[in-house]
Image: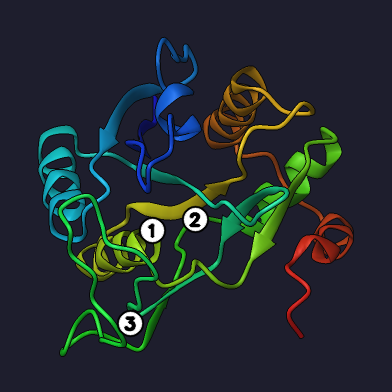
């Protein structure tokens, strides 16, 4: 069975909760060997804990999850950039502005998870999810970049997933269903036809 690590974040910026923390409570799977963890919303602490989890668990797949207050759909992130410009402080009071993340790293790293295929799979299940070409410039992008940087010579397939705030039309249960569908995709990895990829291409963020 595939080994999958899913992380969420604690609450931040005076929010009362963070759905990516709440959705991991009691979440389980019989299709993969699963480990879940909640990371601190801090630039240094989030990556240090992630590195520890990777060393302890040796995952085949990593789904990093975070909250994006301005998103309306679940977003599968395609790329992380070597840049941080924090609009607010992290939970340790740190606020890097207009800085690179790594002096020796690439300008950006593409997700190593097959998100185009996952988008097609989810579309067939009528799941509202899109592919995003920007993970922002806060802790989420920082964590995704650092993970892809340190894992660039490994076979671990990694991406970041942004979740919108909860509304009357969404729920923790719907976010958990997304996770279950994604784990089913990982466990069974269905063949994806070119036609399905073409169909799912419209789910890419309209940034061009």
Residue reaching furthest front? 14
Disc 2 to disc 3, C-alpha distance: 19 Å
Quarter of the rendering containing residue 108: bottom left
Disc 1 to disc 2, C-alpha distance: 16 Å
Give whichever of discs 2 and 3 has the lower sequence position: 3
Dot 1: what SS?
A: helix
Q: Position of residue 101 (x, y in %)?
A: 23, 79
Q: Where is mark 1, residue-wise?
A: 140
Residue at figure coordinates x 77%, y 26% from the top left: 168
Residue at figure coordinates x 13%, y 59% from the top left: 44
Residue at figure coordinates x 28%, y 82% from the top left: 97
Q: Are marks 1 and 3 in contact (CB under 8 Å)?
A: no
Taking 147 as reference, is 27 above or below it? above
Front position in the image: 206 or 35: 206
Taking 47 as reference, is 54 above or below it? above
Residue at figure coordinates x 66%, y 23% from the top left: 171
Dot 2: what SS?
A: loop
Q: Which mark is residue 82?
A: 3
Give whichever of discs 1 and 2 has the lower sequence position: 2
Taking 33 as reference, is 99 above or below it? below
Q: Nearer the viewer, mark 2 or mark 3?
A: 3
Q: Position of residue 187 (x, y in %)?
A: 53, 30
Dot 3: what SS?
A: loop
Mark 2 surroundings within 10 Å by alpha-carbon count, few (fewer than 14), some (14 through 19), many (20 or more): many
Residue 181 in the figure: left or right of residue 49 = right
Mark 1 surroundings within 10 Å by alpha-carbon count, few (fewer than 14), some (14 through 19), many (20 or more): many
> Quadrant where the C terminus lies?
bottom right
Q: Where is mark 2, residue-wise?
A: 113
Front position in the image: 2 or 68: 68
């Amino acid at each position: 069975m595939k080994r999958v690590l899913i992380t969420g974040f604690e609450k931040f910026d005076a929010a009362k909760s963070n759905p990516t923390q709440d959705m991991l409570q009691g979440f389980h799977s019989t299709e993969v060997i699963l480990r879940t963890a909640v990371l601190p919303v801090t630039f240094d602490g989030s990556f240090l804990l992630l590195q520890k989890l990777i060393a302890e668990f040796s995952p085949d797949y990593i789904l990093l999850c975070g909250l994006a207050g301005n998103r309306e759909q679940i977003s599968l992130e395609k790329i992380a950039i070597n840049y941080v410009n924090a609009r607010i402080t992290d939970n340790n009071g740190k606020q890097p502005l207009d800085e690179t993340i790594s002096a020796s790293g690439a300008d950006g790293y593409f997700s190593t998870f097959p998100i185009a295929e996952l988008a097609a799979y989810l579309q067939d299940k009528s799941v509202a999810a899109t592919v995003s070409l920007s993970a922002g410039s806060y802790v989420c992008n920082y964590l995704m970049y650092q993970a892809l940087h340190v894992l660039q010579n490994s076979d671990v397939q990694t991406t970041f997933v942004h979740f919108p705030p909860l509304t009357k039309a969404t729920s923790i249960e719907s976010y958990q269903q997304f996770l279950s569908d994604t784990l089913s995709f990982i466990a069974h990895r269905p063949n994806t036809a070119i036609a399905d990829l073409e169909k799912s291409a419209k789910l890419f963020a309209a940034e061009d």
